[in-house]
Image (cartoon, rainbow, N blue to C red):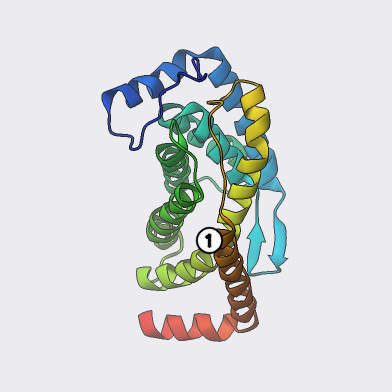
Amino acid sequence: MKNTNSTSKNYALPISASYWKSALAEMKNVRALIMCALLCAVSIILEKFQIPIIPGVLEVSFSFISISLCSFLTGPVIAIPCGIIVDIVGALINGYSFFFGYTLSAVLGAFIYALFLYRTKLSFERIAAARFTINLFVNVLLGSVWRVAMSGGPYGYYVAISGIKNLLLLPLEVFIMTFFLGALLPSLKKLKLCDPTLSLKVSSKKMIIFTIVLIAGTALLILYSLNKSEINSAIKSVFG
């Protein structure tokens, strides 16, 4: 972020030594640290306000926008303390029960965002892949381990329940991320916070397909909310 200009190098994959040198250098960049602190504060505030799309079934928080933006701007090294701060301070301020497992999940989520979005060409596919990876591995597979540790019960049951919600919620989350990053990109470039050559465009064909998927996902979420008890009972009978 220290040298975010037209000569900033982008990377197809986060596997080169120079990529990690750039990410490590952000720790010495005062501007990056200030940006991280501001976005952490925004994320903690947003976490307190969740919008009930389907009461009792689906609540959407926009805190993941600020976390993904922080990871996009400052990289995977800063993403680690960012995730820790947001989880621990957020738990203290918002009154949530603290559990180390969820702190690890917050760190992994921020880290994964950075691996997909930092110093690379932004695209709809990268945003979707980042969110899918987090939903599957962090929210579903790892999150179900924390549920078992805290509440007991069969692991497969939590995987199934969490998998349904995260799969159906994925199109909406990808849409929100794409919209906000695309809307903020011109301002970020004017402030010299990112590479001025970056762009985020979605073709009409992809947008039509995505809109259909989004509508279908929303319809399935509504159906799930209407039959939540029956579906959960059926899943519990399988894994119970």
Image-quadrant location for residue 64: top right
Vertical comparison of 190 with 110: above or below: above
Horizontal side, residue 88 vs residue 59: left or right: left
Q: Nearer the viewer, residue 22 or 112?
A: 22
| SS under mark 1 | helix
Q: Nearer the viewer, residue 102 or 136?
A: 136
Residue located at (66% from left, 32% from top): 186
Residue 85 visible in the snapshot: no
What type is the residue that disc 1 sits on? Leu
Indicate the position of residue 93 as horizontal and vertical percent values.
66, 38
Residue located at (62% from left, 35% from top): 185
Q: Nearer the viewer, residue 185 or 98?
A: 185
Indicate the position of residue 173 as horizontal and vertical percent values.
58, 56
- Give the farthest residue toward the front: 204
Q: How many marks?
A: 1
Indicate the position of residue 194 as horizontal and vertical percent values.
55, 26
Residue 10 visible in the snapshot: yes
Residue located at (65% from left, 82% from top): 226
Horizontal side, residue 225 vs residue 143: left or right: right
Horizontal side, residue 192 vs residue 141: left or right: right
Residue under label 1, please give it.
170
Indicate the position of residue 56 as horizontal and vertical percent values.
67, 69
Q: Nearer the viewer, residue 118 or 151?
A: 118
